Amino acid sequence: MKRIKKILWSVWRVWFYIVMLIPILIMLPFLVASILTESGYPYFFKMSRIWAKCVLFGMGFYYKVEKVQKLDPKKSYMFVANHTSMTDIMLMLAVVDNPFVFVGKMSLAKIPLFGFFYKRTSILVDRSCSKSRMEVFDQAQKRINRGLSICIFPEGGVPHDESILLDAFKDGAFRLAADHHLPIVPLIFPDNKKRLSYTFYSGSPGLMRAKILSPVETVSVAGEPLDRKELREKVRKIILDELMAFKEKDASKFE
């Protein structure tokens, strides 16, 4: 029985990469056309959302999103969420309406075809290089000037220890948000680790919940940027408290 489960898990994991590529191949001419100019990015973003939903549904995932507050479609935000799975990117695209760009690690640019578009539309950072980290701020300002939002997973990566509910946050997202006066919108993804973690023989189709919380302001009443470390810990506590609430709610169902 265990051998059969491992075979099914292996096929399902391989299918994940196939279902990532199929929509890209179908939309390829339109995707390429949309990245030729900066003005084409909103169209690229719309197609990215279609791609993300195709991947989620193709894997047997269905999502339910709760929005605490309606966001201003004409305003730029900093979107942050807990990071536990490769599907975090897809779910972020599926549930957030405001066009945004990811700030992410360079290694994702190595994924065939997906990486081609990722490195041309996202802000890539080499966290081991101080120059690369500084360039992020200039690139972010250009995107914000075009009316776009920014998305960062502030844990800086998925924790190797899957028992960790929420890892420590890096400063980058909060420094960017404070310096550019971007309200921070926390998102909660309580199911992605269960659905498709980085443990190969694990996961299953099913529900993926998402909760979009109210924006956290990053400037004082006087218009001064708030302390990024205080913002970091405040937002981390908000996300951690929400994750704990989901965990307790799920546990109570089995009592």
Image (cartoon, helix red, strand yellow):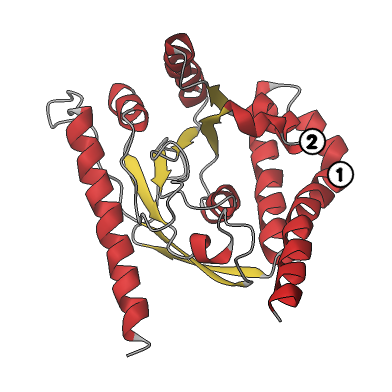
Q: Nearer the viewer, residue 9 or 184?
A: 9
Q: Residue at x 24, y 33 (%)?
A: 218
| Residue that badge 1 annotates | 25
| Residue that badge 2 annotates | 113
User: At numbered mark 2, what does the secondary structure look like: helix, strand or loop?
Assistant: loop
Question: Seen in the image, is 97 located left or right of residue 130?
Answer: right
Count of residue discs: 2
Residue found at the far top of this picture:
131
Above or below 113: residue 24: below
Quadrant hosting residue 240: bottom left
**Residue flagged by tag 1: what amino acid is it?**
Leu
Report how far apart the C-alphas of labels 2 and 1 lie in the structure.
9 Å
Q: Are marks 2 and 1 in contact (CB under 8 Å)?
A: yes
Q: Residue at x 69, y 37 (%)?
A: 44
Quarter containing the C terminus = bottom left
Residue 116: x %, y % from top left: 75, 29
Callout 1: few (<14), some (14-19), or many (20+) C-alpha neighbours within 10 Å?
few
Q: Nearer the viewer, residue 248 or 55?
A: 248
**Residue flagged by tag 2: what amino acid is it?**
Leu
Residue 25: x %, y % from top left: 86, 44
Above or below 78: residue 68: below
Quadrant hosting residue 78: top left
Residue 97: x %, y % from top left: 53, 50
Which of the two labelled residues, at mark 2 and mark 1, occupies the earlier sequence position? 1
Residue found at the far left of this picture:
222
Q: Residue at x 55, y 57 (%)?
A: 197
User: At numbered mark 1, what does the secondary structure look like: helix, strand or loop?
Assistant: helix
Residue 241: x %, y % from top left: 25, 60
Callout 2: few (<14), some (14-19), or many (20+) C-alpha neighbours within 10 Å?
some
Q: Residue at x 54, y 52 (%)?
A: 85
User: Of circles 2 and 1, which is in front?
Assistant: 2
Tell me the number on the disc at residue 253: none
